[in-house]
Image (cartoon, rainbow, N blue to C red):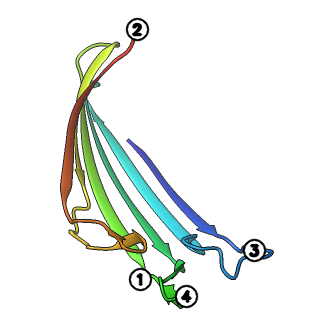
Amino acid sequence: MLAGVTFMYQSFQTGTLKQPWHMPTLQANYHLSYFMKEKVVFSLNSYMMQGMQAIEQNGKVKKLPTILDLNLKVDFLFSQNFSAFLELNNLLANKYQRYLYYSQKGINFLIGATCSF
């Protein structure tokens, strides 16, 4: 089992810009991975971002809401060179905007395979 937590506070000097557009001032990440019989890996991660600001079309500054996201991934390791995975993203079904006017659409998934030579 592997686990980790990261917190990051950022302060920006923008020079000629009014704000550091779309840059979070606070980020937090958590991940947990569980290895089952060396062939299946379950991974859970979450992240939070807050303090982002954007500029609207009319020139006004808009503070974007805090983002909270939770994701789950399962990897199936068939051999050293081949694996398949299933990712479930945004399990909380939050409809947030990481960038102004580009909204996240709720729960989504990704199925795939990896092959290395």
Mark number displayed over residue 59: 4
Q: Nearer the viewer, mark 2 or mark 4?
A: 4
Amino acid type at circle 3 is: Thr
Residue of label 3 = 14
Distance between the alpha carbons at the discs numbered 3 and 1: 21 Å
Residue 37 placement (x, y as % from top left): 24, 27
Which badge, 3 or 1, is on the more N-terminal residue? 3
Expressed as whole percent of the image width and height from the top left, the position of residue 70 reads: 30, 62
Q: Secondary structure at mark 3?
A: loop
Residue 92 visible in the snapshot:
yes
CA separation in Å, label 1 and label 4: 18 Å
> Is label 3 or label 1 in front?
3
Contact, mark 2 vs mark 1 (Cβ under 8 Å): no
Q: Amino acid at mark 1?
A: Pro
Kindly identify which numbered label has been placed on residue 117: 2
Tag 1 residue: 65
Instruction: Identify the residue shown where x is 21% and y is 65%.
Output: 106
Return the x and y of residue 59 as percentages of the image width and height. 55, 87
Q: Residue at x 71, y 74 (%)?
A: 11
Q: Quadrant of residue 25?
A: bottom right
Classify residue 78 as left or right of residue 14: left
